Amino acid sequence: MAVDMRLPTVIKAMSLSVSAADRKDMVVPGDVITSDTGFMRGHGTYVDEDKLTASVAGEVQRVDKLICVRPLKTRFNGEVGDVVVGRITEVQQKRWKVETNSRLDSVLLLSSVNLPGGELRRRSAEDELTMREYLQEGDLISAEVQSVFSDGALSLHTRSLKYGKLGQGVLVQLSPSLIKRQKTHFHNLPCGASIILGNNGFVWLYPTPGQQEEEAGGFYTSLEPVSLSDREVISRLRNCLLALAAHKVLLYDTSVLYCYESSLQHQNQNRLHWPTWCLQGNGLVLHARSVQTLKVNR
C-alpha cells in the first residue's frame, strides 16, 4: 500500500544586516528573518531556537532594532488620525455601531458628532431619541479615528464639516494595504469627480459638490439627479480602481489620475471589461509611472 510522505527541507535563511536595512524582503510563515539576537521581536514574528521567524506572509519592516512583518492581506488596524469610510450597522444607546473593515465594529458616540445647526452643547435625552434622524442603519459615513480601545475597537468622530453622512456615489471595497497614507485623503479630481480614500480600504466616489451649507452639520445629502457625464466618469474611476488593485498598485490621487488618463482611449462600451485593457500593457505602464512618482515624492 503506497503512502505519500513529505520530508522536511532546509529553509534558506534571509539575513537582515545593517547594509540591507533599506531592503524589503518578502517572507512566508516559517521563514527565518535573522538569527542575530540584537533585534527586537515585533508583530508578525516569533522566536524559534534563538531565530526570529515570520508568522505571517508579508513584507519585512525594520525600525531601528525592531523587526516586524506587515501582512499582505489583513483586516484594517486603525490608528489615531486615520480617515475611514464606514457603514452604520446598529443604533445603540448614545452610540452607533459602524462597519469599518476591522476585526471589531467601530463606535461612533453621540457626543462625537456635530449637531444639526452646529450647536455646541451637551447632548440631552431628546438628542438620544432622535438619533435615527441623524444616522440610521445602512447609512454611509466618513469619519476619523479618535482613539483605539484596549480590545482593538476604534472610536470615531465626525467633528468636522468634511466628515459626516455620505450622499450619492459609489463605494469600492479594496484591501487596506493598497491605500497610501497621505496628509489628506479627500481629493477633488480634475475629471469632475471627487474621491475619499479611506485608510480602511473603503473608497468613496461621488460627484464634486458645490458649496455645502454649514447649518447641515455634516448630515446634508444632496438628492438631486446625477448627470450622465458624471455617472460615466464615476464608473470609469471605479473600474480604474479595480484595475490598479488587481496589479497591486498603491492607490492615491496621482496613480488614479494616471489610470484614468490611460483609459480615455477606450470607448464607453468597453469600460465594463476593465481587465482586458489593463492586462494589455497599460497596467505595467501605470505601475512604472506610479513607482517613479513614489521615488520623487520620497
Image (spheres, grey):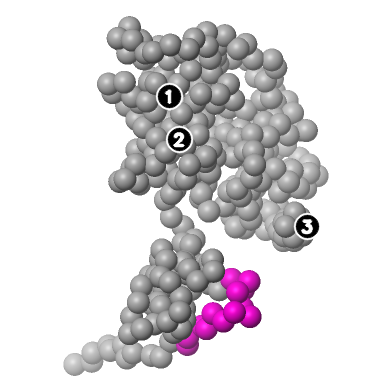
* Total numbered labels: 3
The x, y position of residue 187, in whole percent, is 68, 34
13 part of magenta stretch: yes
Q: Please say if the residues under marks 1 and 2 sit with CB atoms less than 8 Å apart.
A: yes
Element type where label 1 sits in the image: strand
**Residue at the disc numbered 3:** 296
Q: Is residue 168 left or right of residue 104?
A: right
Q: Classify 21 as above or below 246.
A: below
| Residue beneath the point at 68% across and 54% down | 278
Q: Please say if the residues under marks 3 and 2 sit with CB atoms less than 8 Å apart.
A: no
Q: Which residue is nearer to you in this view: 162 or 19?
A: 19
The x, y position of residue 15, in whole percent, is 52, 83
| Residue beneath the point at 41% across and 63% down | 43
| Residue beneath the point at 33% across and 24% down | 95
Sequence order check, earlier mark of 1 and 2: 1
| Residue beneath the point at 38% across and 90% down | 9
**Residue at the disc numbered 1:** 112
